[in-house]
Image (spheres, coloured by chain):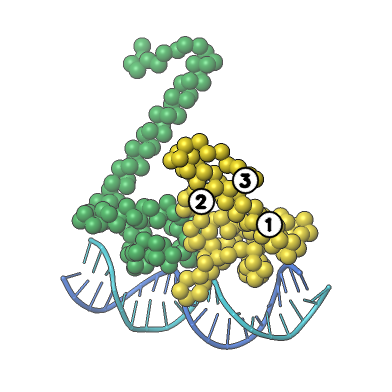
Chain colours: A yellow, B green, C blue, D cyan
Amino acid sequence: MQDESYKTKKVISIGAVSEITGLSERQIRYYEERKLVFPERTKKGTRKYSFQDVERLMDIINQMEDGVQTFEIRQELLRKEKEKEMTDRSVRDQMIRGQLNAVFGIAKPRRYPR
Amino acid sequence: MQDESYKTKKVISIGAVSEITGLSERQIRYYEERKLVFPERTKKGTRKYSFQDVERLMDIINQMEDGVQTFEIRQELLRKEKEKEMTDRSVRDQMIRGQLNAVFGIAKPRRYPR
DNA sequence: CGTGTAAGGAATTCTGACACG
DNA sequence: CGTGTAAGGAATTCTGACACG
């Protein structure tokens, strides 16, 4: 699970992204300004995108076509991040609980202490 | 099997390839001249590489380090292509044979007719 | 709000060539 | 043979701004 370096490695220039997505460079830069995509920068400052970023842009295209505003798309993005954070946290908690259990034996988690 | 468009899509500029591989642009262009890698060109003529091309270059680096000459690397490449062609052909033949068999029933292939 | 465009500059890429060995 | 480099030009990308709506 995870890695897929081909998908996440930032190596595509804005020109290529424009070709692939059909978006103008202006649009792509604007979506970055609205914090919807996050390319990396080379030392000299040119933007580099990953295939994952390209997919993200495709998704944005669809939402824009549905009349969704950049602000709303951003909200949705933040919401998903929060959600993922919660999931990760609970996964981590579960693992820690498992470890403790392995060491100290059965210790059922008590939701309401005392 | 096959597809993996992320791996084969030609979207990486020579500068990025240089960064990833550590090769100079001069070297990368030279290996193309020697027909070891085959980038695409944009309308305006700039080279575009795929992750697969990058892997190919990594492989070339290793061979060069072992003192293999570009000519030999090329020979090896051609040899492999021929080999693949043969494999593909035999796979296709097998499929056709299977189809014929399904339609006309058991018809064992005779290597020496008559 | 989302996008086009002209502006000026900086960085990238290209080719053909000379150089060294 | 494999690679560095300077040369001149063309194409790319960047930013900040004005425009329209």
Residue identifier under label 2: B6
Judge depth for marks 3 and 1 and give the one in front.
Answer: 3
Q: Residue at x 57, y 51 (%)?
A: A89
Q: Residue at x 73, y 65 (%)?
A: A71
Residue type pointed to by label 1 = Arg
Residue identifier under label 3: A114
- Toward which corner of the image does residue B93 lie, by quadrant? top left
In terms of depth relative to the viewer, which is nearer, A108 or A65?
A108
- The residues tagged by marks 2 and 3 sit, at their Cα atoms, a distance apart of 55 Å
Q: Is residue A15 above or below residue A94?
A: below
Judge depth for marks 2 and 3 and give the one in front.
Answer: 3
- For the residue labelled by badge 3, is the local secondary structure a helix, a strand or a loop? loop
Q: Position of residue B66 (x, y in %)?
A: 21, 54
Q: Chain of mark 1?
A: A
Are both tags, 1 and 2, on one chain? no
- For the residue labelled by badge 2, is the local secondary structure a helix, a strand or a loop? helix
Q: Position of residue B76 (x, y in %)?
A: 28, 46
Q: Chain of mark 2?
A: B
Q: Earlier in the sequence, mark 3 or mark 1?
A: 1
- For the residue labelled by badge 1, is the local secondary structure a helix, a strand or a loop? helix
Residue type pointed to by label 3 = Arg
Is any part of residue B16 visible from this angle? yes
Residue identifier under label 1: A79
Residue type pointed to by label 2 = Tyr
- The label number, if any, that marks residue A29 in the structure image: none
